[in-house]
Amino acid sequence: MNNYIPINKAVNPVCIYQGDEPLISKMLGVDEMIYGFDGTPSDYATCVGAPEMFIKVEEDGLYYFGVEADDTGSLTIAGEQAIKKDGTPPNGKLNIETDSRYLKAGYYKVALSWTNNAYTPASNNAAAFNVTMDREPIQAGKYEGNSTMKREFSPSPKIKLWTIEKESAITCEPSKEVELEFEKPEPVYLEGNGGCNVSSLRPKICVTVCKDESENVWRCRVISVSAGAKLTMYEGIYVNPYVDPPLNGEEATEAVNEMNGYQTRGRVGTWHTPQASLAHEEHHRRQWEDAYKFYWKDSKIQEMLENQTISCDKEPNMDKAVKFMQALANEMALDLWTETLAYVLALPDDANDRPYCAGQEALNEATAYVIRLADAMGWNNVPRFITKPGTIEPPCFMPPVSEGETRSMAVAEEPAPLTLSMADTSQFTEGKITVRFRNEGNEPVRIPDEINDETSDFFFVTVLRTQQGKMRVLNREIGTMTFQRPLNYRELAPGQEYSVTIPVCLDEVDLEGWKQCSCELETRYYNQQGKDCFLGFSGQRPGSRCNEKNLPVFNTSGKPVPPCRGMGDMADNGVECSVVMEKTEFDARAAFPDFKLVFTNKGEKTVRLFDDFYPLKDNGPHISIEIFWKLTKEKKEKVAAYYPHYCIERGQFLNFITLKPGERHEVLIKDAYLLMHYFGPSRRLRNGEKYELEVIFRDGYGDSGVRRKYVGRKDFSVVDQSPWR
């Protein structure tokens, strides 16, 4: 059955597990085993589950889940693993992992799995498994002690499991626009002087399929889309005037001056409040919210997904159709994530910038409190001035989320003195890479000397791409971090280099499946804070990212993996691919011109191409298009792209184009301006700049067993063609 079933379409739902007891109560003497709660008999489970089982969501909203296990336990919701509690030593004892997600009302298919590791003697081998679900954050149990038997489960409500006889109908209803729901979990407060941070919650797109009887196809339908951001707050080492008010006029004067200077200083002073830090971080969270909602609509992901179809004759199984569509939705969710983070992490976060102005507004209440105290105590020398906060609204003030030129955009157009390159990827499979900063300018450059295993995810975003177009983000977290103490700095003289090793998360990388792929690893550096620091962010400063292509990180033989065939303009079969543009000079305000792909056989043998340029008449061409801004002779930055966001099930009969030696074949790409998607705040090309158009056609059928990549390139210029010029 479907991963999601509306409440009014569920036929004969039956609750098979009320949650009165844990799914597996605490016990000893359990052998090594794996159990999937699929209805298989069990000596230990209070509910054996069913081959297909569901949770029931009564109303739309944010739901919290927890998995407690000894040793390993997992929860999958609508085909996506939501939680996996690690059971590898020393994590085998009863403990908890949690997750939250926005869900619409209805039934969601779930899967449960529990693993009990071997232990000697088996008589002392403990087992336990419990899954919780609530509208409030899941409460932790008591996990002290070295024995699972002495620990206690979470008091939160346990999950309830349902079976459904069938779905009443799966015929297609008209598409309905789905709004992105933004999750705002309660802030987590920790002791210590760590950096407060806002970490993005990865977007989740849940899809289903419906049967279009007239066309005999499965059509994709988006059920829900959610994203969010979580806040982690540290108490800091400042003096809170609400808790420890000034004892005399001197302390009151210091408190007023310190708190008044927060906005212009760009960091926490000796007097501060947690309410001000929270206001600062909540402002960052609003940036994520506004950007996510903008890019969800702007990228038209729902429209692209719901244009997807699968023939019911070729795939009669609905579950497999849903699985295919969900995999496509997951890839598009990654696109949404990377586009949003590139925007949010480019927003300034230094002295007098909007997050600090938001914090200043909250801090002014504490300043007024101290002033009232000074009035009551007769401390006449205490300043009565309160700083006026700077501009706060809107949180996302840079294009494209907001219109208009900004100071930050002007700064971004300056040449970047700091470059970033890959220094060492030999430890990639161990979860480490080394990157190198270099000062290419004529003046000293400094950066925060705060990069370590705990903070690197807030300075770098690392992405791995394969030649097949798969992408994985290798960060455990992505977001912003606000230090509550003066920063340490590292200054680089002209020509000086600095290397640092950072962790990469490989949890979602199929090391075995990608072993024979040619991969590209890209790391981008983001920083928007620090006195007199280089402010780097992706998509604007050419020195803020680095990549390594044809990365041999999965090759177990130790030999480099060769790149795809036809990496240059001439493929190994003698076919040259070139691009002929309708015009190579045009105004930025004009539509991007049409162009032709020209394939010329310059070899000595007859060759054939797979005729796959427009396989679907109502969709765009089955090619990849990228536009690069030519910064220097060596450096270029991708500013726009088109990728065919659809997959095709090949039939038995394929069409080919035969080229004898000297013959050529032309493919017209019309209405190219409708295809392009522009990146970065400007969302357009700029007059006075030079660009390169790169077009890629992948042919896996022209020669049996050979996968070729044809690449055509063409330089063009964008010039102001106003009449008065």
Image (cartoon, rainbow, N blue to C red):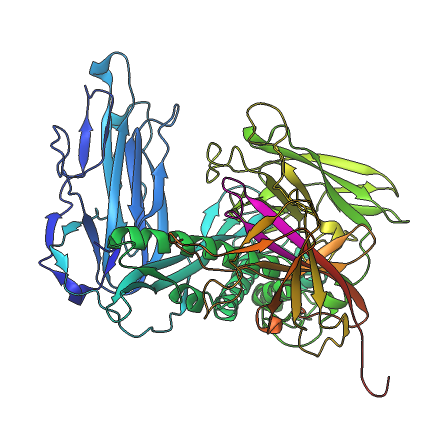
- Does any portion of residue 55 appear in the rendered image? yes
Q: Closer to the camera, 520 or 443?
A: 520
Q: Residue at x 22, y 15 (%)?
A: 122
Q: Position of residue 82 (x, y in %)?
A: 35, 46
Query: In the shown orientation, is residue 437 left or right of residue 211?
Result: right
Q: Position of residue 564 (x, y in %)?
A: 61, 41
Q: Position of residue 314 (x, y in %)?
A: 29, 54
Q: Which residues are magenta?
A: 695-711
Q: Residue furthest top?
A: 121
Quadrant holding the N terminus: bottom left
Q: Closer to the camera, 688 or 227?
A: 688
Q: Closer to the camera, 433 or 493?
A: 433
Q: Closer to the camera, 609 or 143?
A: 609
Q: Quadrant of residue 559 in the image?
A: top right
Q: Is residue 367 above or below residue 125?
A: below
Quadrant holding the C terminus: bottom right
